[in-house]
Amino acid sequence: MQQVNDCFSKVKKDCFKFISSQETKKDKFKNKDKMIKSFLIPISFWISKKANKKRPLIIGLAGGQGSGKTTISSILTLILQKYFKLNVFKISIDDFYKTRKDRKLISKKKHPLLMTRGVPGTHDVDLMLSLFKKIKVKKFKNFQVPKFNKAVDDRYNKSLWYKIKSKPDVVIFEGWCVGAKPQKNNQLKKPINSLERAYDQSMKWRSYVNNQLKTKYKTLFKQLDGLLYLKAKNFNLLRQWRLKQERKLWVQTKNKKNLKIMSSGDVINFMQTYQRITQQMFKDGLKSSSIIMSLNSNHQIEKIKFKK
C-alpha cells in the first residue's frame, strides 16, 4: 500500500491535468482518486514487473466503443513514464485504418459495408506488423507510424504522423477489437441486427470480416504479451457512451469545415457494424485477457481481476 501511495503522490498532478483536458462542462470525471489508486496504479505495477529492457513489452487494451480506452491508456502511460521511468509508446488500432481511397476500392471489390471504417478488414495489418517488427530490432532506427483523423475519416498528412525516436520499453496497443477471436461459421448465419438483415443478406460481409480474424488479425494479436479488457455491462451502454463521445468530438474540434462527425442516427448505424464482434468479446475477453476491468453503468471501473 505504501508503494501505491508513494506512486499516487508522484503522478496525481499529471493524471488530474490530463483528466481535466478530457472533461467538458457537461461531462466531469467522478472518483478520480479511486480510479487511479485502486485500479490503474496496481495495473501499472503489473506492467512494470513484466517489462524487460531487452525487448519491448506489447500490451493490448481492448474494450467496446466509448468504453474509455483512450483515457485509461493515456493515464497508464503517464504513470509508467513518470513513476517507473519507462519509455512508453501508446498507439490505437484506429490509427491504422485504411485510407478512404483504399476502403473505397475494397468496398467495390468485396462488399459496400467495408467503406465504413471499424471492422477487421478495414485496417492496414501489414503496417501494424511492421511497427512491431521495427521496435524489436537490435539496431533501432527511428520511424513514423500513421495517425488517423476521425473528424474527416481519413489519415492525417504524413508530416503529422507519430515519430518513434527511441526504442520503447512498453507499447500500449489499444482498440475496440484488439485480441478479438473469430466466430464459428454457424454463428454467422443468424443476423444480429437490422443492418445485417438489410445489407448483408448474403453473409458476404460478416464472413469476410470473420475470415480476417481467422487469418491476418490472428497473426497480429499473437504479437501481444498481455491483454487488458474493459468490460461494459451491455451493448446498449456502449451505444450511450459512444454518442457522448461524438458530442465531445464536435465540441473539441475547432475547424468544423469538412467534418465527418456523425449524427445520433449515424452513430447507431455505425455501431451496428461493431455489434457482432463486441458481443462475442464480452464472452471471449473474459477468457483470454490478463486483466479484466469491469465498468459500472456510470462509466467507472468498479473492480479489476488479475488473471495471468
Image (cartoon, grey):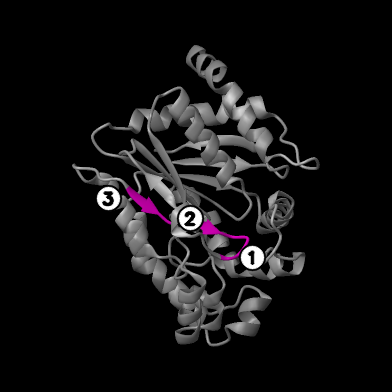
User: Picture coordinates of residue 76 (x, y %)?
Assistant: 50, 34
Q: What secondary structure is marked by label 3?
A: helix
In front: mark 1 or mark 2? 2
Q: What secondary structure is marked by label 2?
A: loop
Q: Quarter of the image holding residue 149?
A: bottom right
Q: Toward the viewer: 158 or 78?
A: 158
User: Picture coordinates of residue 143 (x, y %)?
Assistant: 32, 50
The residue identified by callout 1 is: 271
The residue identified by callout 3 is: 134
Q: Compared to 206, does 288 lie above or below?
A: above
- In screen coordinates, is 161 left or right of 166? right
Q: Compared to 174, does 200 lie above or below?
A: below
How much space separates mark 3 and mark 2, taking CA atoms?
17 Å
In front: mark 1 or mark 3? 3
Q: Which residues are magenta?
A: 143-153
Task: Assess whether residue 131 is covered by the magenta stretch.
Answer: no
Circle 3 crowding by C-alpha within 10 Å: few under 14, some 14–19, many from 20: some
Q: Which numbered disc, 1 or 3, marks the residue that appears first in the sequence?
A: 3
Q: Compared to 116, does 31 lie above or below?
A: above
Q: Quarter of the image holding residue 263?
A: bottom right
- Three-letter amino acid code at disc 3? Lys
- Three-letter amino acid code at disc 2? Lys
Residue at position x 33%, y 64% from top? 126
User: Picture coordinates of residue 32 (x, y %)?
Assistant: 66, 29
How much space separates mark 1 and mark 3, taking CA atoms?
33 Å
Task: Assess whether residue 151 is covered by the magenta stretch.
Answer: yes
User: Picture coordinates of residue 153 (x, y %)?
Assistant: 58, 66
Residue at position x 67%, y 67% from top? 258
Q: What secondary structure is marked by label 1?
A: helix
Residue at position x 30%, y 57% from top? 130
Q: Toward the viewer: 208 or 25?
A: 25
